[in-house]
Structure formats: C-alpha cells, structure tokens
Amino acid sequence: MNSRSDNSDNGRDAAAVAPDSEALVLSRLDDKGALTLTLNRPAQFNALSQAMLSAMQEALEQIDDHVRVVVIAANGRAFCAGHDLREMRSHADEAWQCALFQQCSQMMQTLVSLPQPVIARVQGVAAAAGCQLVASCDLAVAADHASFGVSGINLGLFCSTPSVALSRNLSRKRAFQLLMSGEFISAQTAVDWGLLNECVADELLDASIEQWCNTICSKSKVAVSTGKRLFHEQLERPLDQAYALASDAMACNMMAEDVAEGIDAFFDKRPPNWKHR
C-alpha cells in the first residue's frame, strides 16, 4: 500500500476531502479497504489548526463500511508539531481556546470510536497534540529517526489534553515524565515505553504499514469491529464489570456466521472464507 495520497489505478479518492495539493487532509482508499488520511500542511509541520481539525473530523465522519483499516499519515519532514501556536496566540479569549481544545478532543475520540482499527504512520517528529494523535491511534509504526515529546511545559503550558491519551498508553510514571520534562524520546524508546508498536528504517515504513493493513484486512470484519469496541470499553471499567462486559460480547460474537466458518476451517485445515469482509 502506498501511504501517500496521490491517485492510483488500484485506489479511489474518498469523497470527504478533495485530492488536490491544497487540501489540508488528503484521502485515499485502496482496493483492499485501507484508507490513508494524510495531514498536508508540510510547511507548518502539519500543526493542527482549527481548519485542519475540521478537515480531519469531516474525513473521519465520512468513513463507511468499505473501509477496513485507517492509516493516519503526514506529508513533509514532521508527522505533526501539535497545535498551531501562531493561531492560538492570535486569540486572546478563553471561549475560543476552549472551543479549539474541545474540537481536538472530539477528533481524538472519533479515532477511538471508529469500528476500524487506526494505524499511525509516523515519518518524523510528533510533538504535543501530535504525540496525542499517535497515542489515540490503535496501532503506531514509526521511522527509526522519528521523535516524540510533549513540550508544552517548556512554554508554561501543561499538555493537559495530550495527557489523557498518553496516560492510557504508557505507565503513569513514563507519561508524567514526558509531560513534566518537555523532553523528546527516540522512536526506539517510544517502542520500549509502549507508545509505538515498532520502529523501522525509513525505507521500510511503507512495507511495515502495508503488512499491518494486510493482516487486519485478512480477518473477519465482525471480529475486528467487535474486538476494538470491547477493548476500549472494558479498559474504563472495574475488573468485575470488565469481565461481565467481555463475557457478553464474546457470547454474542460466538453467534456470528464467521465464527462458525472460522472454527470449521480450523478443523478442516483450510483458510476461512469470511462472510463479512
């Protein structure tokens, strides 16, 4: 899968965002059902302006059942430098600031609530809200030269909203370390701390993303969407409630045709023929 957002004979441009170089978010769906949304403000290091957040929200809300997996990518040297500080500094009223952070929080929650798994493809620095974006994705793969940090503390601003996503990915002490130090960590350290699934050489990044997408697209759509929803829901519950929720979900999942097919295929020693693809 080509993670860039140009036109291709084996893909189609999604209707959510125009496929031109001026669009803030580029969108491309390949023939396997892998949708790549590419942040496209390279000159501004893909900073999340109000307009960029609106474009992302629109693209996410228009995802349909043809999509099996979503990849969040970026053009340019940086993955995402966080919020657009120039835009933020130009607005002195608290109401505008509150609306911006609510807009960003809504977009991050939309990534989690999508039935499709979301993979971050990180080719450069991910700072502050950019680091939050990586943490909000279900999976994340980075080039080995990428770096990650929440540097708001260096500006006198605690990264409160990124702390929500980071504290749900890293141990408490590791998350607090990032938030309080304002220092950046390497891609390998991000793997060790649990922010990334893997880091690879730059020339292998697209191949790694394609492998992840192929793996997800080869599974039953019912199992994938059910599993993602349950995974996130049970995380927020006490242990007994989490098990009750998981038990009900698994019993319901067992009633799906794909499960009968999967079990039969296992005993027959053949690949499953999923009804839901």
Image: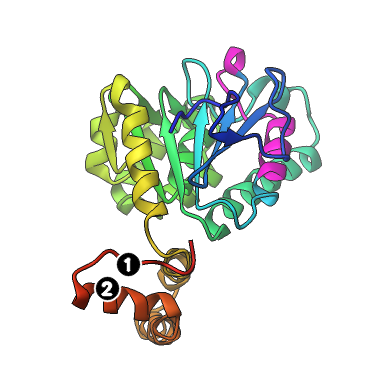
Dot label at residue 217: none
Q: Secondary structure at mark 2?
A: helix
Taking 61 as reference, is 67 left or right? left
Taking 251 as reference, is 57 left or right? right
Boundaries of the magenta span? 42-59
Residue identified by numbered label 2:
265
Q: Amino acid at mark 2?
A: Ala
Residue 24 is situated, as x and y percent measured from the top left of the image, at 68, 26
- 85 is higher (above) or lower (below) than 137: above
Taking 17 as reference, is 179 left or right? left
Q: Could you give the CA–CA distance between mark 1 and mark 2, rounded to whole angstroms?
A: 5 Å
- The single residue placed furthest to the top in the displayed view is 43
- 145 is higher (above) or lower (below) than 110: above
The quarter holding residue 249 reads bottom left
Is residue 13 a member of the stretch shown in magenta?
no
Q: Are marks 1 and 2 in contact (CB under 8 Å)?
A: yes
Is residue 44 a member of the stretch shown in magenta?
yes
